[in-house]
Image: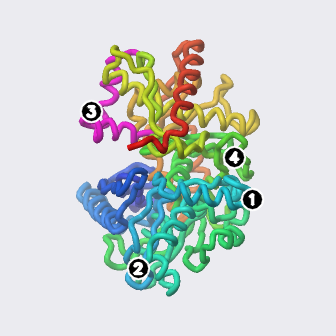
Amino acid sequence: MSGEEVFIGSIDQGTTSTRFIIYDRYASPIGSHQVEFTQFYPQSGWVEHDPMEILESVRVCISKAVDKATAAGHNVDNGLKAIGLTNQRETTVVWSKSTGLPLYNAIVWMDVRTSSICRKLEKELPGGRTHFVESCGLPISTYFSALKLLWLLENVDAVKEAVKKGDALFGTIDTWLIWNLTGGKDKGLHVTDVSNASRTMLMNLKTLDWDKSTLDTMGIAAEILPKIVSNAEIIGNIAKGWAITGIPIAGCLGDQHAAMVGQACRKGEAKSTYGTGAFILLNTGEEVIKSNHGLLSTLAFKLGPKAPANYALEGSIAIAGAAVQWLRDSLGIIKSASEIEELALQVDSTGGVYFVPAFNGLFAPWWRDDARGVCIGITRFTNKSHIARAILESMCFQVKDVLDSMHKDAGEKGEVKNAKGQFLLRVDGGATVNNLLMQIQADILGTPVVRPADIETTALGAAYAAGLAVGIWTEDEIFSSGEKMKKAKTFNPVLDEELRKKKVASWCKAVERTFDLADLSL
């Protein structure tokens, strides 16, 4: 194959947009297309997507990206060897096997409508909030798919009926897309991968299969669940009716797990992805580490049916880039997300303002769904630049909270440090183009932050997994990070240590102010 062009495609289905990127054998992008889709907010705290709109966004992105790469002179039709898929995790869809249509909108990962179901389970089950942690590594929370599925089973007649008739299929977005890509109601494959399955609360982290006792406790029928596969194997071929018919789907990972592969995170290395939320994962190798500090034990990746599973500690932050979108769309203070850096640079501090974006509660390490957003320290001196800078700082403080917990859980032996004894945080995602944000992050952590040359590591990770499955790359090539690190930009801390400690203490005070605010009168 040395003389011919070889390409791998990557579907990157995120919380607000879908992309399809085509990479060459050197993992350089040669064509891409992106489409934004609608967010629905039917009630306070509810967030939904239309699964059909997401499906159409994938169709458009594949067609346009192939057209662009072909127009640039690449023989994509002959050279495309496989595609990988990565997706927003936890977001839940139930659809009809016979019609192929969703029975309700997709309930998005940040949706909190299941809080009453969570409280009920916590009271009824002997283990309370941590009842299922032993099997799945996750606390009972509105975040995870099983609770969203329970809500659909309890509240949507069409879902109840379809389950009774044996016509219902459950899946996260990866499952919905693969089923449709491989034929839909005409023999579509009903599968998920270990990383997405690990976010449902229903998969046993040790056996990597659905946990029977959890299904029995929750009253969920195993028949509606997809088959679980590894992250790098040929799952099936793309059916007729798509622009890339016949191409194998050979890689599938939840977005944060794909970013770990894209960042080549080995055991003891961590990455933080800044998107709608922010997600920090530390690879703990073949060992499941239980957190005593509010983090999740989760699967990192399993790169092949016979490959060992790597596990991770994860801290999830619900609102990161979404706070910038709020500043733009709800307050109109900026016209585009990129303007926040310039606005925040007009002041050299927040002027004592602290902003905690607990719009739908707080995830790790606090796990408070009764929290709501606060902005404190406002004086007559405060202007929009101070608010903008406080929003950027809020992302960085939240990441620090998670990393502090990670350091405690993993211990000295569980982390890789550089020659100076510093822990390096690898960063990626759209928001990392903001140099001010990255410098603030290094200052608040007091340790270096490393940004790769290609910040879109999520799509790259899915491409790597697919390429690995079809023999384009080896695992050694994917994880040889030396060359990648040479092209990366490092942000070193410059903030005075005493001031850093004072700012962190002020942030903690602000976080405490967010608790127990969910029932404020409208």
Residue marked by disc 4: 284
Mark 3 or mark 4, which has the lower sequence index? 4
What mark, if any, has residue 126 been given in the picture? 1
Query: Can you tell which of label 1 and label 2 is closer to the viewer?
Result: 1
The vertical placement of 459 against 443, above or below, is below
Q: Which residue is at a point 52% across and 15% down the rendered structure image?
A: 495
Q: Residue furthest front?
A: 521
Task: Name the element at disc 1.
Answer: loop
Mark 2 or mark 3, which has the lower sequence index? 2
Colour pattern of the rendering: rainbow
Residue marked by disc 3: 334
Q: Which region is colored magenta?
A: 320-348
Residue marked by disc 2: 183
Q: Indicate the amino acid at tag 4.
A: Thr
Q: Is residue 122 visible?
A: yes
Query: Is 102 situated left or right of 371 in this image?
Result: left
What is the crowding at mark 2: few (fewer than 14 residues within 10 Å), some, or many (at least 20)?
some
What is the crowding at mark 1: few (fewer than 14 residues within 10 Å), some, or many (at least 20)?
few
